[in-house]
Image (spheres, helix red, strand yellow):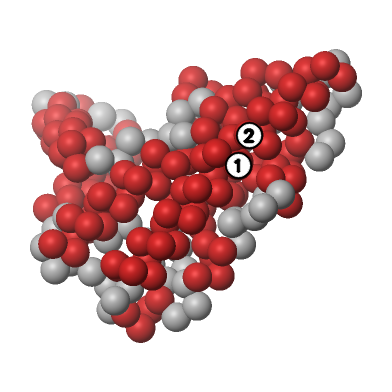
Amino acid sequence: LWATQVGDHRFDDRLPIVTLESQQKQLQAREAFLKRLQQIDRAKLARSDQINYDIFSRLTRQMIDEDGFQSYLMPISGHSGFHVRFPELKHRARLKTLQDFENYITRLRGFNQYTSEHIELMRTGMARRMVLPGIVFNDYQKAIQAHIVSDPEKSLLYAPFQKLPETLSQVEQDGLRESARLAIRNSVVPGYVKFLEFMEKEYVP
């Protein structure tokens, strides 16, 4: 998602993997980056590169320290989290070509699994007594219920398909719209339904 946002489109059809195993791999990668950085002689760098060196070192150390506190077991707050950021995808994704729209739909199809992985992180946090104060979750339902729709075309995530580029043929446009409706109906909506149930029955109590 970050790659897409900064213009690296190699992963436009993927969502992050947020399992416990992936969190550990991410920590190991950060530690490896820091070790590589320490092998560079800072004194031999130009002043501007020394500043970049220091910033990168500090940010990486901070992320490693944060991983040590297992903050990833509390991936949401009362007003933010994957469930709030995901609908913003339509603003961040590149949507110009047929492939761009197909990539976007692939991400819609992956939302249900993406939700399941976040729920497992939060369940692990619950087991370790790592949860946020309940008071921060006042009105949390609204951010979830807004995406539980009976008509896929009413979903905010369907918005890019309301008016597709004229460079796409009518057959391509029809195919994309049908695929988007199916992805929203079979993945996005079930994901939000599942997450709302988890929050209501397990996490908030």
For disc 2, the marked residue is 182
Q: Position of residue 131 (x, y in %)?
A: 23, 69
The residue identified by callout 1 is: 185
Return the x and y of residue 165 as percentages of the image width and height: 83, 27
Vertical comparison of 122 with 102: above or below: below
Q: Relative to 170, is 78 on the left or the right?
A: left
Which disc is residue 122 wearing?
Answer: none
Residue type highlighted by circle 1: Arg
Residue that appears at 35% across and 61% down: 198
Q: CA gap, disc 2 to disc 1?
A: 5 Å
Kind of element beneath mark 1: helix
The type of residue carrying mark 2 is: Leu
Q: Quadrant of residue 91?
A: top right
Find residue 30 and report its horizontal and vertical position in percent.
Answer: 20, 36
Q: Is residue 197 above or below residue 68?
A: below
Q: Position of residue 162 (x, y in %)?
A: 81, 40
Q: In percent of the image, x 80 and y 24: which residue is there?
A: 173
Label 2 with label 1: CB-CB less than 8 Å: yes
Residue 177 lies in quadrant: top right
Q: Is residue 151 above or below residue 126?
A: above
Q: Residues within 10 Å of mark 1 (few under 14, many from 20)?
A: many
Count of picture labels: 2
